Protein backbone atom coordinates (compact mmCIF):
# COMPACT_ATOMS: atom_id res chain seq x y z
CA UNK A 1 0.00 0.00 0.00
CA UNK A 2 2.85 2.38 0.82
CA UNK A 3 4.43 1.66 -2.56
CA UNK A 4 1.17 2.54 -4.34
CA UNK A 5 0.87 5.81 -2.41
CA UNK A 6 4.44 6.87 -3.18
CA UNK A 7 3.96 5.90 -6.85
CA UNK A 8 0.71 7.92 -6.94
CA UNK A 9 2.43 10.89 -5.25
CA UNK A 10 5.25 10.81 -7.82
CA UNK A 11 2.76 10.65 -10.72
CA UNK A 12 0.71 13.57 -9.35
CA UNK A 13 3.87 15.62 -8.73
CA UNK A 14 5.12 14.90 -12.25
CA UNK A 15 1.72 15.84 -13.71
CA UNK A 16 1.59 19.12 -11.76
CA UNK A 17 5.14 20.09 -12.69
CA UNK A 18 4.47 19.30 -16.36
CA UNK A 19 1.16 21.19 -16.28
CA UNK A 20 2.72 24.32 -14.75
CA UNK A 21 5.67 24.15 -17.15
CA UNK A 22 3.41 23.93 -20.20
CA UNK A 23 1.11 26.66 -18.85
CA UNK A 24 4.01 29.03 -18.17
CA UNK A 25 5.55 28.42 -21.61
CA UNK A 26 2.30 29.00 -23.45
CA UNK A 27 1.67 32.16 -21.45
CA UNK A 28 4.99 33.67 -22.55
CA UNK A 29 4.02 33.34 -26.20
CA UNK A 30 1.12 35.73 -25.79
CA UNK A 31 1.80 39.46 -25.92
CA UNK A 32 1.21 41.16 -22.61
CA UNK A 33 -1.01 44.21 -23.27
CA UNK A 34 0.12 45.87 -20.02
CA UNK A 35 3.82 45.33 -20.64
CA UNK A 36 4.43 48.83 -22.09
CA UNK A 37 1.72 50.68 -20.21
CA UNK A 38 4.12 53.31 -18.83
CA UNK A 39 6.03 53.99 -22.05
CA UNK A 40 4.87 57.12 -23.81
CA UNK A 41 5.66 58.15 -27.33
CA UNK A 42 7.79 61.28 -27.63
CA UNK A 43 7.27 63.44 -30.68
CA UNK A 44 10.69 65.10 -30.90
CA UNK A 45 12.62 68.05 -29.55
CA UNK A 46 10.89 71.39 -29.06
CA UNK A 47 13.53 74.13 -28.64
CA UNK A 48 11.01 76.52 -27.13
CA UNK A 49 10.53 74.12 -24.23
CA UNK A 50 14.17 74.41 -23.16
CA UNK A 51 15.50 77.69 -24.59
CA UNK A 52 19.23 78.23 -24.63
CA UNK A 53 20.73 80.97 -22.47
CA UNK A 54 21.85 83.15 -25.39
CA UNK A 55 19.28 81.65 -27.78
CA UNK A 56 22.08 79.71 -29.44
CA UNK A 57 19.50 77.22 -30.67
CA UNK A 58 17.11 78.77 -33.14
CA UNK A 59 14.52 76.37 -34.53
CA UNK A 60 16.94 73.50 -34.04
CA UNK A 61 19.87 75.25 -35.74
CA UNK A 62 23.08 76.02 -33.89
CA UNK A 63 24.15 79.65 -34.22
CA UNK A 64 27.74 80.77 -34.27
CA UNK A 65 28.60 81.35 -30.60
CA UNK A 66 31.77 83.27 -31.40
CA UNK A 67 29.82 85.79 -33.48
CA UNK A 68 27.24 86.01 -30.73
CA UNK A 69 29.93 86.68 -28.13
CA UNK A 70 31.56 89.35 -30.29
CA UNK A 71 28.22 91.04 -30.91
CA UNK A 72 27.51 91.02 -27.18
CA UNK A 73 30.92 92.46 -26.36
CA UNK A 74 30.54 95.17 -29.00
CA UNK A 75 27.13 96.16 -27.67
CA UNK A 76 28.39 96.33 -24.11
CA UNK A 77 31.86 97.76 -24.78
CA UNK A 78 30.81 101.38 -24.41
CA UNK A 79 29.52 100.92 -20.86
CA UNK A 80 31.58 97.96 -19.61
CA UNK A 81 34.92 98.38 -17.87
CA UNK A 82 37.66 95.80 -18.31
CA UNK A 83 39.24 94.54 -15.11
CA UNK A 84 42.42 92.54 -15.69
CA UNK A 85 44.06 90.63 -12.86
CA UNK A 86 47.41 91.98 -14.07
CA UNK A 87 46.23 95.52 -13.26
CA UNK A 88 45.79 94.45 -9.63
CA UNK A 89 49.27 93.03 -9.16
CA UNK A 90 49.12 89.50 -10.57
CA UNK A 91 52.62 88.64 -11.83
CA UNK A 92 52.36 85.04 -13.15
CA UNK A 93 55.96 84.51 -12.02
CA UNK A 94 55.42 81.62 -9.59
CA UNK A 95 54.49 83.78 -6.61
CA UNK A 96 51.01 83.65 -5.08
CA UNK A 97 48.61 85.82 -7.12
CA UNK A 98 45.51 85.06 -5.06
CA UNK A 99 45.16 88.55 -3.54
CA UNK A 100 45.41 90.20 -6.97
CA UNK A 101 42.54 87.98 -8.19
CA UNK A 102 40.46 88.82 -5.10
CA UNK A 103 41.05 92.58 -5.56
CA UNK A 104 40.24 92.39 -9.28
CA UNK A 105 37.04 90.44 -8.54
CA UNK A 106 35.92 93.02 -5.96
CA UNK A 107 36.54 95.84 -8.44
CA UNK A 108 34.66 94.06 -11.23
CA UNK A 109 31.79 93.05 -8.96
CA UNK A 110 31.34 96.59 -7.62
CA UNK A 111 31.26 98.26 -11.07
CA UNK A 112 27.99 100.16 -11.58
CA UNK A 113 27.67 99.80 -15.36
CA UNK A 114 29.06 96.29 -15.80
CA UNK A 115 32.50 94.79 -16.03
CA UNK A 116 34.57 92.22 -17.85
CA UNK A 117 36.84 90.24 -15.49
CA UNK A 118 39.84 89.18 -17.61
CA UNK A 119 42.51 86.56 -16.98
CA UNK A 120 45.02 87.10 -19.82
CA UNK A 121 46.05 84.39 -22.24
CA UNK A 122 49.49 82.78 -22.16
CA UNK A 123 50.24 83.17 -18.45
CA UNK A 124 50.20 80.70 -15.55
CA UNK A 125 49.07 82.11 -12.22
CA UNK A 126 49.72 80.50 -8.85
CA UNK A 127 46.51 80.59 -6.79
CA UNK A 128 45.09 79.17 -3.62
CA UNK A 129 41.40 78.20 -3.68
CA UNK A 130 39.20 81.25 -4.37
CA UNK A 131 35.45 81.57 -4.22
CA UNK A 132 34.10 84.28 -6.52
CA UNK A 133 30.72 85.24 -5.14
CA UNK A 134 28.14 87.99 -5.45
CA UNK A 135 25.70 89.49 -5.75
CA UNK A 136 27.42 92.00 -7.98
CA UNK A 137 26.26 95.56 -8.69
CA UNK A 138 25.63 94.86 -12.39
CA UNK A 139 26.16 92.27 -15.10
CA UNK A 140 29.57 90.69 -15.16
CA UNK A 141 31.43 88.85 -17.92
CA UNK A 142 34.23 86.53 -16.81
CA UNK A 143 36.79 85.87 -19.54
CA UNK A 144 39.50 83.26 -18.94
CA UNK A 145 41.67 82.65 -21.98
CA UNK A 146 43.50 79.36 -22.29
CA UNK A 147 47.18 79.01 -23.08
Image (cartoon, rainbow, N blue to C red):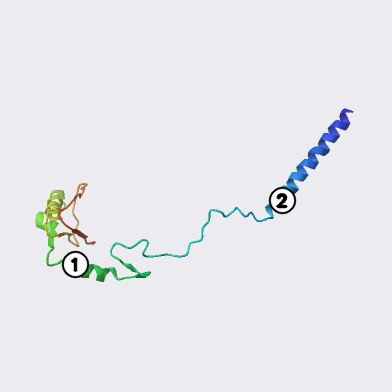
Give me the disc on residue 84: none
Residue at position x 31%, y 70% from top? 63
Give me the disc on residue 25: 2
Q: Is mark 1 on a helix, strand or loop?
A: helix
Residue 132 spot, x, y in % from top left: 20, 50
Q: Quadrant of residue 2?
A: top right
Residue at position x 16%, y 49% from top? 98
Q: CA gap, disc 2 to disc 1?
A: 69 Å
- In the image, residue 41 sits, relative to residue 27, either above or below, namely below
Residue at position x 68%, y 52% from top? 28
Given residues 106 and 45, the one toward you in this image is 45
Given residues 95 and 68, the one toward you in this image is 68
Give the quarter of the figure containing the N terminus: top right
First reached walking from the N terminus: tag 2 or tag 1:
2
Residue 47 spot, x, y in % from top left: 37, 65
Residue at position x 70%, y 51% from top? 27
Q: Residues within 10 Å of mark 1 (few under 14, many from 20)?
A: some
- In the image, residue 15 sits, relative to residue 54, either above or below, namely above
Q: Which residue lies furthest to the right in this view?
A: 1
Residue 119 spot, x, y in % from top left: 18, 59
Q: What element carries label 2?
A: helix
Q: Name the residue under label 1.
A: 73
Q: Residues within 10 Å of mark 2 (few under 14, many from 20)?
A: few
Amino acid sequence: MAAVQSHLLINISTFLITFFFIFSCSNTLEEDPLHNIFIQEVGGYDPSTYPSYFTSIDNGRFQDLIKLQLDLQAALSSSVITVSVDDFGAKADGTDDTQAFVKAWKAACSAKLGAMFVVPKGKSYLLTPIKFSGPCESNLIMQVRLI
